[in-house]
Image (spheres, grey):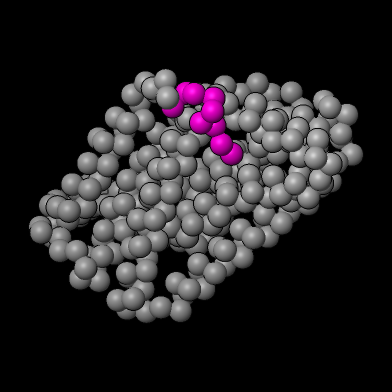
Amino acid sequence: MAGSFLIMLREGLEAALIVGIILAYLARTGNRGKARVVWFGVGLSVLMSVLVGAAIFVTAGGLEGRPEEIFEGLAMLTAAGVLTYMIFWMRRQAINIRAHLQQQVSTALESGSLAALGFLAFVAVGREGIETALFMFAATKAATPAATTMGGVLGLVAAISLGYLLYRGTYRLNLRAFFNVTSVLLLLFAAGLLAHGIHEFHEAGVIPPVIEEVWNTNNVLHEQSTLGSFARALFGYNANPSLVEVLAYATYLLVIGWMYFRPPTARELRPGRASA
Protein backbone atom coordinates (compact mmCIF):
# COMPACT_ATOMS: atom_id res chain seq x y z
CA MET A 1 0.00 0.00 0.00
CA ALA A 2 2.79 2.43 0.92
CA GLY A 3 4.66 1.83 -2.34
CA SER A 4 1.59 2.30 -4.56
CA PHE A 5 0.57 5.42 -2.59
CA LEU A 6 4.02 6.96 -3.12
CA ILE A 7 4.02 6.09 -6.82
CA MET A 8 0.58 7.55 -7.48
CA LEU A 9 1.29 10.64 -5.35
CA ARG A 10 4.52 11.39 -7.20
CA GLU A 11 3.38 10.49 -10.72
CA GLY A 12 -0.05 12.02 -10.21
CA LEU A 13 1.35 15.30 -8.95
CA GLU A 14 3.77 15.48 -11.87
CA ALA A 15 0.87 15.00 -14.29
CA ALA A 16 -1.25 17.53 -12.37
CA LEU A 17 1.54 20.10 -12.51
CA ILE A 18 1.92 19.60 -16.27
CA VAL A 19 -1.82 20.08 -16.83
CA GLY A 20 -1.86 23.03 -14.44
CA ILE A 21 0.98 24.79 -16.28
CA ILE A 22 -0.79 24.33 -19.63
CA LEU A 23 -4.17 25.53 -18.32
CA ALA A 24 -2.67 28.51 -16.49
CA TYR A 25 -0.83 29.61 -19.63
CA LEU A 26 -4.01 29.31 -21.70
CA ALA A 27 -5.91 31.42 -19.16
CA ARG A 28 -3.15 34.03 -19.04
CA THR A 29 -3.06 34.36 -22.84
CA GLY A 30 -6.82 34.65 -23.21
CA ASN A 31 -7.29 31.12 -24.58
CA ARG A 32 -9.23 29.63 -21.68
CA GLY A 33 -11.85 28.27 -24.11
CA LYS A 34 -9.28 25.87 -25.57
CA ALA A 35 -8.92 24.09 -22.23
CA ARG A 36 -11.44 21.47 -23.34
CA VAL A 37 -8.95 20.26 -25.95
CA VAL A 38 -6.35 19.82 -23.22
CA TRP A 39 -8.80 17.80 -21.12
CA PHE A 40 -9.64 15.68 -24.16
CA GLY A 41 -5.94 14.87 -24.57
CA VAL A 42 -5.67 14.10 -20.85
CA GLY A 43 -8.70 11.79 -21.07
CA LEU A 44 -7.20 9.87 -23.99
CA SER A 45 -3.90 9.50 -22.14
CA VAL A 46 -5.69 8.11 -19.07
CA LEU A 47 -7.57 5.61 -21.27
CA MET A 48 -4.32 4.56 -22.93
CA SER A 49 -2.66 4.10 -19.53
CA VAL A 50 -5.51 1.91 -18.29
CA LEU A 51 -5.30 -0.24 -21.44
CA VAL A 52 -1.53 -0.60 -21.07
CA GLY A 53 -1.91 -1.56 -17.42
CA ALA A 54 -4.63 -4.09 -18.26
CA ALA A 55 -2.42 -5.60 -20.98
CA ILE A 56 0.46 -6.02 -18.53
CA PHE A 57 -1.71 -7.70 -15.89
CA VAL A 58 -3.48 -9.94 -18.44
CA THR A 59 -0.16 -11.01 -19.93
CA ALA A 60 1.25 -11.84 -16.51
CA GLY A 61 -1.94 -13.64 -15.51
CA GLY A 62 -1.72 -15.92 -18.54
CA LEU A 63 1.72 -17.23 -17.57
CA GLU A 64 2.63 -19.92 -15.09
CA GLY A 65 5.78 -21.43 -13.65
CA ARG A 66 9.15 -20.43 -15.06
CA PRO A 67 7.80 -18.14 -17.84
CA GLU A 68 5.82 -16.22 -15.21
CA GLU A 69 8.89 -15.84 -13.00
CA ILE A 70 10.98 -14.61 -15.93
CA PHE A 71 8.25 -12.17 -17.02
CA GLU A 72 7.88 -10.79 -13.51
CA GLY A 73 11.64 -10.54 -13.13
CA LEU A 74 11.93 -8.59 -16.37
CA ALA A 75 9.00 -6.37 -15.34
CA MET A 76 10.69 -5.61 -12.01
CA LEU A 77 14.01 -4.74 -13.62
CA THR A 78 12.30 -2.65 -16.30
CA ALA A 79 10.28 -0.80 -13.66
CA ALA A 80 13.44 -0.13 -11.64
CA GLY A 81 15.18 1.24 -14.74
CA VAL A 82 12.27 3.43 -15.84
CA LEU A 83 11.74 4.68 -12.29
CA THR A 84 15.41 5.63 -12.03
CA TYR A 85 15.26 7.46 -15.36
CA MET A 86 12.09 9.28 -14.30
CA ILE A 87 13.70 10.47 -11.06
CA PHE A 88 16.70 11.90 -12.89
CA TRP A 89 14.53 13.34 -15.66
CA MET A 90 12.47 15.33 -13.17
CA ARG A 91 15.59 16.46 -11.32
CA ARG A 92 17.05 17.80 -14.57
CA GLN A 93 13.87 19.28 -16.04
CA ALA A 94 12.30 20.80 -12.91
CA ILE A 95 14.15 24.07 -13.49
CA ASN A 96 13.01 24.55 -17.10
CA ILE A 97 9.84 22.49 -17.50
CA ARG A 98 7.46 25.45 -17.04
CA ALA A 99 9.15 27.58 -19.69
CA HIS A 100 9.45 24.64 -22.07
CA LEU A 101 5.78 23.66 -21.75
CA GLN A 102 4.68 27.25 -22.24
CA GLN A 103 6.80 27.46 -25.37
CA GLN A 104 5.18 24.31 -26.74
CA VAL A 105 1.69 25.63 -25.96
CA SER A 106 2.55 28.94 -27.61
CA THR A 107 3.76 27.13 -30.72
CA ALA A 108 0.54 25.10 -30.88
CA LEU A 109 -1.57 28.24 -30.49
CA GLU A 110 0.37 30.11 -33.17
CA SER A 111 -0.13 27.24 -35.60
CA GLY A 112 -3.87 27.39 -34.92
CA SER A 113 -3.94 23.63 -34.48
CA LEU A 114 -6.14 22.43 -31.64
CA ALA A 115 -4.96 18.90 -32.40
CA ALA A 116 -1.38 19.94 -31.60
CA LEU A 117 -2.52 21.33 -28.25
CA GLY A 118 -4.43 18.17 -27.41
CA PHE A 119 -1.52 16.01 -28.52
CA LEU A 120 0.82 17.95 -26.24
CA ALA A 121 -1.35 17.14 -23.23
CA PHE A 122 -1.78 13.55 -24.41
CA VAL A 123 1.97 12.92 -24.69
CA ALA A 124 2.96 14.78 -21.51
CA VAL A 125 0.39 13.07 -19.30
CA GLY A 126 0.47 9.76 -21.18
CA ARG A 127 4.12 9.23 -20.36
CA GLU A 128 3.33 9.54 -16.67
CA GLY A 129 0.39 7.16 -17.05
CA ILE A 130 2.33 4.40 -18.80
CA GLU A 131 5.09 4.64 -16.22
CA THR A 132 2.48 4.40 -13.46
CA ALA A 133 0.92 1.28 -15.01
CA LEU A 134 4.31 -0.45 -15.00
CA PHE A 135 5.14 0.68 -11.46
CA MET A 136 1.75 -0.43 -10.13
CA PHE A 137 2.25 -3.90 -11.58
CA ALA A 138 5.61 -4.09 -9.84
CA ALA A 139 4.05 -2.82 -6.59
CA THR A 140 1.45 -5.62 -6.57
CA LYS A 141 4.29 -8.13 -6.17
CA ALA A 142 5.28 -6.58 -2.85
CA ALA A 143 1.75 -6.25 -1.42
CA THR A 144 -1.73 -7.66 -1.88
CA PRO A 145 -3.76 -6.40 -4.88
CA ALA A 146 -6.32 -4.87 -2.51
CA ALA A 147 -3.68 -2.95 -0.53
CA THR A 148 -1.97 -1.84 -3.74
CA THR A 149 -5.25 -0.59 -5.20
CA MET A 150 -6.19 1.27 -2.03
CA GLY A 151 -2.77 2.89 -1.80
CA GLY A 152 -2.92 3.88 -5.46
CA VAL A 153 -6.38 5.43 -5.13
CA LEU A 154 -5.39 7.38 -2.01
CA GLY A 155 -2.20 8.57 -3.70
CA LEU A 156 -4.11 9.69 -6.79
CA VAL A 157 -6.69 11.58 -4.70
CA ALA A 158 -3.90 13.30 -2.76
CA ALA A 159 -2.06 14.20 -5.98
CA ILE A 160 -5.16 15.64 -7.65
CA SER A 161 -6.03 17.62 -4.52
CA LEU A 162 -2.52 19.07 -4.21
CA GLY A 163 -2.40 19.82 -7.93
CA TYR A 164 -5.71 21.67 -7.79
CA LEU A 165 -4.70 23.69 -4.74
CA LEU A 166 -1.40 24.61 -6.36
CA TYR A 167 -3.19 25.66 -9.54
CA ARG A 168 -5.63 27.82 -7.59
CA GLY A 169 -2.78 29.35 -5.64
CA THR A 170 -4.29 28.49 -2.25
CA TYR A 171 -1.49 26.18 -1.18
CA ARG A 172 2.23 26.82 -1.20
CA LEU A 173 4.21 23.60 -1.55
CA ASN A 174 8.00 23.57 -1.72
CA LEU A 175 8.21 21.46 -4.88
CA ARG A 176 11.98 21.13 -4.71
CA ALA A 177 11.78 19.68 -1.20
CA PHE A 178 8.82 17.49 -2.18
CA PHE A 179 10.59 15.98 -5.17
CA ASN A 180 13.84 15.52 -3.24
CA VAL A 181 12.11 13.64 -0.42
CA THR A 182 9.98 11.49 -2.72
CA SER A 183 13.01 10.84 -4.94
CA VAL A 184 14.91 9.37 -1.98
CA LEU A 185 11.95 7.13 -1.15
CA LEU A 186 11.57 6.13 -4.80
CA LEU A 187 15.28 5.28 -5.04
CA LEU A 188 14.80 2.90 -2.12
CA PHE A 189 11.70 1.52 -3.82
CA ALA A 190 13.62 1.05 -7.09
CA ALA A 191 16.42 -0.74 -5.24
CA GLY A 192 13.79 -3.08 -3.80
CA LEU A 193 12.37 -3.70 -7.29
CA LEU A 194 15.84 -4.54 -8.55
CA ALA A 195 16.43 -7.03 -5.74
CA HIS A 196 12.96 -8.51 -6.17
CA GLY A 197 13.52 -8.92 -9.90
CA ILE A 198 16.74 -10.78 -9.19
CA HIS A 199 14.87 -12.97 -6.71
CA GLU A 200 12.41 -13.91 -9.48
CA PHE A 201 15.36 -14.84 -11.69
CA HIS A 202 16.68 -17.00 -8.84
CA GLU A 203 13.35 -18.80 -8.78
CA ALA A 204 13.48 -19.28 -12.56
CA GLY A 205 17.06 -20.57 -12.43
CA VAL A 206 18.36 -17.72 -14.61
CA ILE A 207 20.67 -16.12 -12.04
CA PRO A 208 22.38 -18.25 -9.36
CA PRO A 209 22.08 -16.85 -5.81
CA VAL A 210 25.76 -17.71 -5.00
CA ILE A 211 24.82 -17.76 -1.30
CA GLU A 212 21.11 -18.53 -0.96
CA GLU A 213 20.60 -16.91 2.45
CA VAL A 214 23.05 -14.30 3.74
CA TRP A 215 21.00 -13.69 6.89
CA ASN A 216 17.53 -14.33 8.26
CA THR A 217 15.82 -11.63 10.32
CA ASN A 218 12.32 -13.10 10.35
CA ASN A 219 12.64 -13.62 14.10
CA VAL A 220 13.25 -9.86 14.47
CA LEU A 221 10.93 -8.47 11.77
CA HIS A 222 8.89 -11.04 9.89
CA GLU A 223 8.07 -10.25 6.27
CA GLN A 224 4.40 -11.10 6.82
CA SER A 225 3.98 -8.81 9.83
CA THR A 226 2.33 -5.42 9.41
CA LEU A 227 5.60 -3.51 9.74
CA GLY A 228 7.46 -6.09 7.66
CA SER A 229 4.90 -5.87 4.86
CA PHE A 230 5.16 -2.07 4.93
CA ALA A 231 8.96 -2.20 4.73
CA ARG A 232 8.80 -4.79 1.94
CA ALA A 233 6.35 -2.71 -0.11
CA LEU A 234 8.21 0.57 0.31
CA PHE A 235 11.88 -0.35 0.73
CA GLY A 236 12.08 -3.87 -0.69
CA TYR A 237 12.74 -5.43 2.71
CA ASN A 238 13.74 -9.09 2.47
CA ALA A 239 14.29 -11.04 5.70
CA ASN A 240 16.45 -13.70 4.03
CA PRO A 241 18.09 -12.30 0.88
CA SER A 242 20.67 -14.02 -1.30
CA LEU A 243 24.16 -12.62 -1.73
CA VAL A 244 23.37 -11.38 -5.25
CA GLU A 245 20.26 -9.56 -4.00
CA VAL A 246 22.24 -7.85 -1.20
CA LEU A 247 25.02 -6.80 -3.59
CA ALA A 248 22.56 -5.50 -6.19
CA TYR A 249 20.56 -3.52 -3.59
CA ALA A 250 23.65 -1.98 -1.98
CA THR A 251 25.42 -1.23 -5.27
CA TYR A 252 22.33 0.44 -6.70
CA LEU A 253 21.90 2.73 -3.69
CA LEU A 254 25.59 3.63 -3.56
CA VAL A 255 26.01 4.34 -7.29
CA ILE A 256 22.62 5.84 -8.13
CA GLY A 257 22.43 7.69 -4.81
CA TRP A 258 25.79 9.33 -5.47
CA MET A 259 24.75 10.26 -9.02
CA TYR A 260 21.53 11.82 -7.76
CA PHE A 261 22.96 13.88 -4.92
CA ARG A 262 26.06 15.14 -6.71
CA PRO A 263 25.69 18.76 -7.93
CA PRO A 264 24.27 18.89 -11.49
CA THR A 265 26.74 19.87 -14.19
CA ALA A 266 26.39 23.00 -16.33
CA ARG A 267 25.49 20.78 -19.29
CA GLU A 268 22.61 19.19 -17.37
CA LEU A 269 21.24 22.61 -16.40
CA ARG A 270 21.43 23.98 -19.93
CA PRO A 271 17.94 25.19 -20.98
CA GLY A 272 18.29 23.64 -24.41
CA ARG A 273 18.31 20.20 -22.83
CA ALA A 274 14.82 20.52 -21.41
CA SER A 275 12.17 18.23 -22.79
CA ALA A 276 8.71 17.15 -21.74
Answer whether residue 271 is magenta in the image.
Answer: yes
- On the question of residue 72 being in view, the answer is yes
In the image, taking residue 124 as reference, residue 56 lies left or right, namely left
- On the question of residue 230 being in view, the answer is no
Q: Position of residue 220 (x, y in %)?
A: 22, 47
Answer whether residue 39 is magenta in the image.
Answer: no
The one nearer the camera, 154 or 73, is: 73
In the image, taking residue 249 as reference, residue 182 lies left or right, namely right
- Residue numbers of the magenta segment: 268-276
In the image, taking residue 165 as reference, residue 229 lies left or right, namely left
The one nearer the camera, 150 or 207, is: 207
Q: Position of residue 19 (x, y in %)?
A: 70, 39
Identify which residue is drawn at 66% across, 33% down.
Answer: 101
**Number of numbered discs overlaid on the protein picture:** 0
The one nearer the camera, 149 or 45, is: 45
> For the C terminus, which image quadrant?
top right
Q: Position of residue 187 (x, y in %)?
A: 37, 39
- Which residue appears farthest toward the front when viewing the image? 111
Identify which residue is drawn at 81% across, 35% down.
Answer: 110
